[in-house]
Image: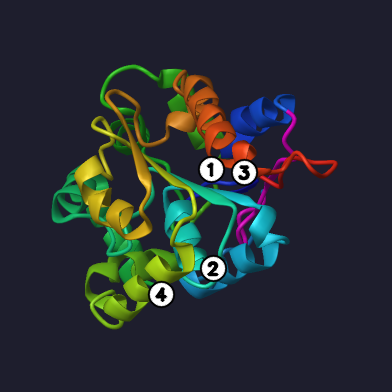
Amino acid sequence: MVCVHGAWEGPWIFRAWTAFFAGEGWSVRSLTLPGHEPGGDVRGVGLKEAAAAVAEGVRDPERTVVVGHSLGGWLTLKYLERRAVAASVLLMPLPPRGLSPEARRRVRSHGGWRLKARLLGGLDCPIQNAEAVRALGFGEVGCEASVKRFLAECVPESGRLLRQIALLPVASRVGWGLREGRLSKTQRGRPHLIVASEADALVSPSDLEGVARLLGAEMLRLESAPHVFLLTDHALPLAGQVNAWLSRRLRPAGGFDEGPEKAYI
């Protein structure tokens, strides 16, 4: 399994999941996107550089389960346009065409104007607003320990990358039909799982229905998990559900039991 983190995140976001899957016998590896190591430099990093890091990090696609969270889910979808994988698990992924108008309004209502000002100034963007992290990442109530942990471990994000994400609703109009066809053809018959939640303040299940149809993916709809559920009590129960789904979809076909390792995750 190769795990791909999202914006402002690093491999630490998957800590609970990598420990869980390692305990289940999987070989687990989390990528670090360019500049997202502690003290790293994200200046100049864009979607192209992040996507190249994913392509380089997946060593054996046919035997790899790729797991992507948030922006990492978008990068996983980008990778899937070109390469067939054993399976993918997309955890509240950024939709191919970016955030919905409603989600963009929600971001603006929680200090998004400060982010916009930094982007217009060509600056990279740290997160220091606990209220915004709480509301957008974890929900309005509770999860204070998770909010503090996120703020303690998050890294500044590339202004270039965030500008490109903001422009996805416009940029995706060019060539998306071709990309849709390529994605559907490359992944036809492969197992894919999309995890979405009604409580996610950034990506709703309805935002992902089109992608699910395109991939032929199963969708796991949650009721109360927030966007950054990986740092909450939802993480391990969901890991168990994903592990059961992978066992059902991969191992009966011969899967990964033939070699010394079950998979690269």
Cα distance between the residues tagged 2 and 4:
17 Å
Residue 253's tag is 3
Cα distance between the residues tagged 1 and 3:
39 Å
Residue 158 drawn at (x, y percent):
48, 63
Pointer 1 residue: 154
Residue 185 drawn at (x, y percent):
42, 70
In the depicted structure, whether residue 5 falls above or below residue 58: above
For mark 4, does the 10 Å Cα neighbourhood hold few (<14), some (14 to 19), or many (20 or more) residues?
A: some
Q: Mark 2 against mark 3, which lies toward the viewer?
A: 3
| Residue at far front of view | 253
Cα distance between the residues tagged 2 and 3:
30 Å
Pointer 2 residue: 51
The magenta-colored residue range is: 25-37
Q: Mark 1 against mark 3, which lies toward the viewer?
A: 3
Q: Amino acid at mark 2?
A: Ala
Q: Amino acid at mark 1?
A: Cys
Q: Residue at x 71, y 47 (%)?
A: 264
Q: Amino acid at mark 4?
A: Arg
Of callouts 1 and 3, the N-terminal one: 1
Residue 23 drawn at (x, y percent):
73, 24
Res 200 quadrant in image = top left
